[in-house]
Image: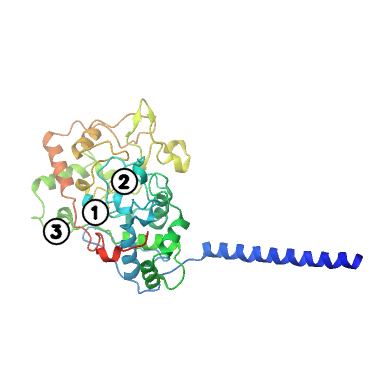
């Protein structure tokens, strides 16, 4: 009987070891699957920067290829990324509206309203942090937010992988970009990010005048408006919307409280504070670029201002008072009527050329199983 007990004990121990070994192996595979950095298999391509913009920054772990860019373009316009197949990236970032949305806040699945205005995807590659509150550190990380947000796309990484793996045409295209094997979400976000890196827009009338040295590219009013924009004793707009000697992003890549969304001293949206939990960051939002500003109305993080004149009048009034109001925000009521008009003319001259091959791909390449 003792011998039988020993046999049972050894058998149970062997089973336990086998189970532990299976669990450990699968755990290691799961961990390594998340830890492995995937690289595209194609030839790296150069993304040219148009006049007025600096070189396009490229991360070492996601060099763009023709195949990943084409794949990312298809994914950007495909509703397959949403839970009910009704919402794509382009739903909120439409090329017809400067890759932004005409609504104050965008509508996601089941017509659910978001909380903030959609920032343009144009020139997003130049931001150090993505979203109004900077919660994503890269274009790749930015892709992860909307697809999981229940009021945007409401899908999961696993759900997207399942749908894409079930589509033969996507299998072919992912294999061409990333090599054979199952489609992983890391491939999805990297492909979309590579496409978004091509969404660079410059060569505006302002650029052709300022950086191309063509004096006939803009009117005298635009030149006067630029002087108002940059002068510290006038508009001082360049304090946050930076202009360099060789290029201009029209953003300082920082966060500021300008008093938007403040009611009786309280914020309707905490902004950067929700990320940093630093009280001094309450009400601060990322400085958006002013490039293509005439195409991306309405304005501000809450989409509360319909026109550029309304935005300008807000700044002329000194914003809304609150404890965190940026020190650069103060009344500009001394600007003359002509200076205000010139400032608007200047901003109208910031509309650049749309990047090539940035619209929806041909219909035949959008065929996907649902």
Pointer 3 with pointer 1, Cβ within 8 A: no
For the residues labelled 3 and 1, the Cα–Cα distance comes to: 29 Å
**Residue lying at 33% horizontally and 70% vertically, measured from the top left:** 67
Compared to residue 70, the image places residue 266 above or below, namely above
Looking at the image, tell me whether mark 3 or mark 1 is earlier in sequence order. 1
Element type at mark 3: loop
Question: Mark 3 Cα within 10 Å, few/some/many (few <14, many 20+)?
Answer: few
- Residue at numbered disc 1: 95
Foreground label between 3 and 2: 2
**Residue lying at 42% horizontally and 55% vertically, measured from the top left:** 141
Element type at mark 1: helix
Question: Which quadrant of the figure contains the C terminus?
Answer: bottom left
Looking at the image, tell me whether mark 1 or mark 2 is earlier in sequence order. 1
155 sits to left or right of 219? right
Can you give x and y, in whole percent of width and height, for residue 20 in the image? 69, 63
Is 11 in front, or is 143?
11
Residue 302, quarter of picture: top left
For the residues labelled 1 and 2, the Cα–Cα distance comes to: 13 Å
- Label number found at residue 213: 3
């Amino acid at each position: 009987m003792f011998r039988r007990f020993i046999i049972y004990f050894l058998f149970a121990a062997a089973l336990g070891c086998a189970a532990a070994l299976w669990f450990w192996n699968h755990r290691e595979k799961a961990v390594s699957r998340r830890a492995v950095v995937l690289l595209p298999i194609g030839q790296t391509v150069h993304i040219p920067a148009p006049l007025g913009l600096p070189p396009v920054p490229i991360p070492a772990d996601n060099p763009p290829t023709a195949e990943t860019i084409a794949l990312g373009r298809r994914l950007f316009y495909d509703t397959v990324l949403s839970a009910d197949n009704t919402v794509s990236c382009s739903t909120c970032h439409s090329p017809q509206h400067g890759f932004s949305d005409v609504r104050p806040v965008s509508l996601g699945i089941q017509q659910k309203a978001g909380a903030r205005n959609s920032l343009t995807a144009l020139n997003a590659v130049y931001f150090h942090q993505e979203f109004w509150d900077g919660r994503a550190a890269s274009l790749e990380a930015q892709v992860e937010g909307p697809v999981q947000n229940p009021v945007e796309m409401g899908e999961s990484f696993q759900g997207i992988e399942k749908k894409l793996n079930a589509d033969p045409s996507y299998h072919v295209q992912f294999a061409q970009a990333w090599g054979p094997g199952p489609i992983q979400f890391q491939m999805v976000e990297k492909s979309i990010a590579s496409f978004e890196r091509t969404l660079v827009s410059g060569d505006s009338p302002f650029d052709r005048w300022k950086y191309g040295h063509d004096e006939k590219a803009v009117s005298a009013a635009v030149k006067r408006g630029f002087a108002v924009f940059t002068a510290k004793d006038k508009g001082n707009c360049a304090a946050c919307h930076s202009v360099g000697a060789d290029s201009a992003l029209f953003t300082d890549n920082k966060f500021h409280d300008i008093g938007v969304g403040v009611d009786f001293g309280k914020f309707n949206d905490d902004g950067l504070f929700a990320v940093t939990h630093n009280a001094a960051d309450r009400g601060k939002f990322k400085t958006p670029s002013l490039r293509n500003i005439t195409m991306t109305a309405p304005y501000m993080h809450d989409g509360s201002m319909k026109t550029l004149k309304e935005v300008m009048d807000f700044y002329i009034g000194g914003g809304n008072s609150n404890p965190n109001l940026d020190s650069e925000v103060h009344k500009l009521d001394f600007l003359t009527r002509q200076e205000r008009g010139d400032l608007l003319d200047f901003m109208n001259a910031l509309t650049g050329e749309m990047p090539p091959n940035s619209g929806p791909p041909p219909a035949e390449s959008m065929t996907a199983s649902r």
